[in-house]
Image (tube, rainbow, N blue to C red):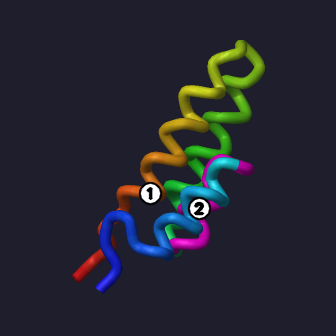
């Protein structure tokens, strides 16, 4: 059972560090990945994308999964 701080979550967080939403995509959460990727892209245009980028990293790291 993978939980907070598991190797999979650390890898997902690292992926989200480079591309917002990539960690969620690796975890199989397609909708959340799309939302975070689009929001980060839109907000980077007004220099606030780092907020979504940070949210993406933390969300991937703290994901508990089902079960």
- Near mark 1 (Cα within 10 A), the count class, few <14, some 14-19 or many ≥20, is many
Residue 21 vs 12, above or below: the answer is above
Identify the main secondary structure in magenta: helix
* Left or right: 36 as drawn, with respect to 55: right
Q: Nearer the viewer, residue 27 or 8?
A: 8
Residue carrying label 1: 61
Task: Name the residue tied to disc 2.
Answer: 23
Mark 2 lies on a secondary structure that is helix
**Nearer to me, 46 or 63:** 63
Q: Position of residue 65 (x, y in %)?
A: 33, 73
Left or right, 60 with respect to 66, comes to: right
In depth, the one of 5 and 43 nearer the eye is: 5
Identify the magenta region.
18-27
The residue under the point 28% across, 77% down is 66
In which image quadrant can residue 38 be found? top right
Cα gap from disc 1 to disc 2, whole angstroms: 9 Å
In this rendering, the answer to whether 44 lies above or below 52 is above
Residue 22: x and y in percent read 65, 59
Rendered-image quadrant of the N terminus: bottom left
Q: Residue at x 66, y 24 (%)?
A: 43
Does label 1 or label 2 sit earlier along the sequence? 2
- Image-quadrant location for residue 46: top right
Label 1 sits on a secondary structure element that is helix
Q: Residue at x 50, y 75 (%)?
A: 8
Q: Quadrant of residue 13?
A: bottom right
Whether the residues at callouts 1 and 2 have beta carbons within 8 Å, the answer is: yes
Can you say whether 22 is above or below 65 in the image? Answer: above
Residue with the most extreme bottom position: 1
């Amino acid at each position: 059972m993978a939980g907070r701080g598991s190797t999979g979550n650390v890898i997902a967080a690292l992926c989200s560090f480079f591309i917002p939403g990539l960690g969620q995509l690796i975890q199989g959460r397609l909708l959340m990945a799309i939302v975070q990727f689009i929001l980060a892209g839109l907000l980077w245009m007004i220099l606030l994308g780092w907020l979504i980028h940070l949210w993406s990293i933390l969300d991937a790291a703290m994901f508990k999964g089902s079960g």
